[in-house]
Amino acid sequence: MTCNLIRRAFGTLRATFALALSLFLALTHIQATAAEIVIGQVAPLTGVLASTGEQMVLGGKIYFESINAQGGINGAAIRQVVLDDGYEVDKTVARTRELLAKPEVVALFGFAGTANITQLLKDGVLAAGGAALVAPYSGGESLRSPFNPWIFHVRAGYADEAEHMVQQLTTLSMNRIAVMYQDDGFGKSGLEGVESALERRKLKVVAAAGYPRNTDDVAEAVKTIAAAKPQAVIMIAINKPAAAFIKQYRETGGAAQLYNISVVNPAEIVRLAGLEFAHGLGISQVVPYPYQAKLPVVREYQQLLKKYAPGAEVNYTSFEEFLGAKVLVEALRRAGPAPTRERVVKALESLQKFDLGGLVVNYSPTNRIGSRTVEVTVIGSSGRLMK
C-alpha cells in the first residue's frame, strides 16, 4: 500500500512538472513572437506599376534588414509584411483592412496611388485602424488637405512639384503649357496643381488631355495636345503611359519641352520609349539626388543597397522609401519597448527638425508634411539622369 502511495505521488509530480514545462515553453514562444515589430505594406507588385512597387518594397527592406542586423529596436526585430494590390483601389482597401485586423501590425508603410489611399480615408479605414501610414508614394493633395492625423508624408506634394516646374518654364518664357494626365485622383491632383501655378501668373493651360487609369492608351491625348502646339507639356503619368506618350508625341513631330512629375523611373522610361525620344525629358524630384554620394544619407543608402540587394541599381523610388523607413524606425525607437499604434503616432509627431543625414523632416501634432523639397532632373544623351 505504501508503494502504491509513493507511485501515485511520483505520478502527480511528473504531471505537475510536465504542466509547468508546457507552460514555460508556451510563455517562451509568446515572448519570442512578441520580440518582433510588424510593419504592414500594401504595394503594386503586379500590373502597370509593378516595377515601381518592387522598388518601393526594396527601399524599406534594405534599411529594416540593416536595423535587424544591429539587434533590432529595443531587442525586437522588424518584420515587413507586404501584400500586393496591383494598383487597384478596391484591392488596396481590402489588403489594408486585412493588415489592420492583425493587432501585431503597429504601423503601415509605403503605399502607392493617390486614388487608392484617398479611398482609405473616405472609407474610414485608417481612422478605424488607428495606425500611422508613413511615406506613401504619392503627392496627392487629397491626402494632405483637409488635414488628417494618420498619414505622415516624407515627400513634397504634387502642387509643390507643379509650382516648381511652372516657375522654371515661365522663367524661360515658356507660357504655352499643356498637361497630359491620368484620369483619376492622382492625375487630377497634378492637373489642379499646374492650373493653380499658372493662375498665379495670370496664365491658363492651353490643353489638358487625360488617359484611362491602368492603361497606356494615350493616342487621344497625343492628338489633343499636338493640335494645341504647346511650348511645354507637363505629364502627370506613371511609367508606361508616360513612355507611350513621349514616343507617340515625338513621332507626330511634337517639339515641346516635356516634363513628368516625380513618380516615374527614368531607366524604365528610356527602356519603353527609347533613348531617341526620352532624351531631354525633365523629371521633378522630391528627395535628394541618389546617384552621387555627397550626403551622408545617400552614402548610407548606396552602401546598404550594395550589401542587402547586390546587383540592384540606385533608384529614386527605392531611395525615397529608404528615407521613409528611416523616419519610421526612429519613431519606433521613440515609442519604446512593445510599441503600440497610438504610441507610434505620438512618436512620429515628435520628429521635429529630424535630420535623416542631409534631408531634414518636420512633423508635429498639426503637421504631417515632412518636406517640401523639389528639384528638376533631366534624362541626358546617355540615358542617365542628370541634375
Image: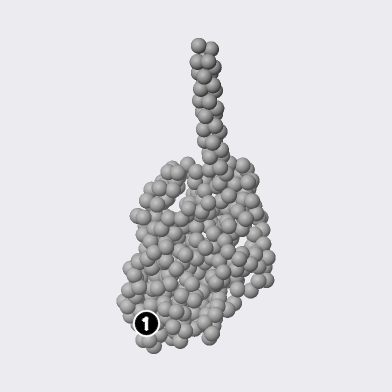
Across and down, in percent, residue 177 comes to: 45, 77
Across and down, in percent, residue 242 comes to: 41, 74
Picture quarter with the C terminus: bottom right
Give neighbour class at mark 1: few <14, some 14-19, many 20+ (Cα, 10 Å): some
Q: Quick one: which residue is furthest to the top in this view?
A: 1
- Residue at the image position 38 percent from the left and 78 percent from the top: 244
Across and down, in percent, residue 178 comes to: 42, 76
Q: Quick one: which residue is furthest to the bottom in this view?
A: 253
Q: Is residue 325 left or right of residue 258?
A: right
The colouring scheme, among rainbow, by chain, secondary structure or one colour, is one colour
> Hey, what amino acid is under mark 1?
Gln
The image shows residue 15, relative to residue 312, as above or below, that is: above
Is residue 327 something one can see in this rendering? no
Choose between 196 and 257: the one closer to the eye: 257
Disc 1: which residue? 248
- Residue at the image position 56 percent from the left and 46 percent from the top: 36
Is residue 253 something one can see in this rendering? yes
- Residue at the image position 53 percent from the left and 12 percent from the top: 2
Across and down, in percent, residue 5 comes to: 52, 14
- Residue at the image position 52 percent from the left and 80 percent from the top: 379
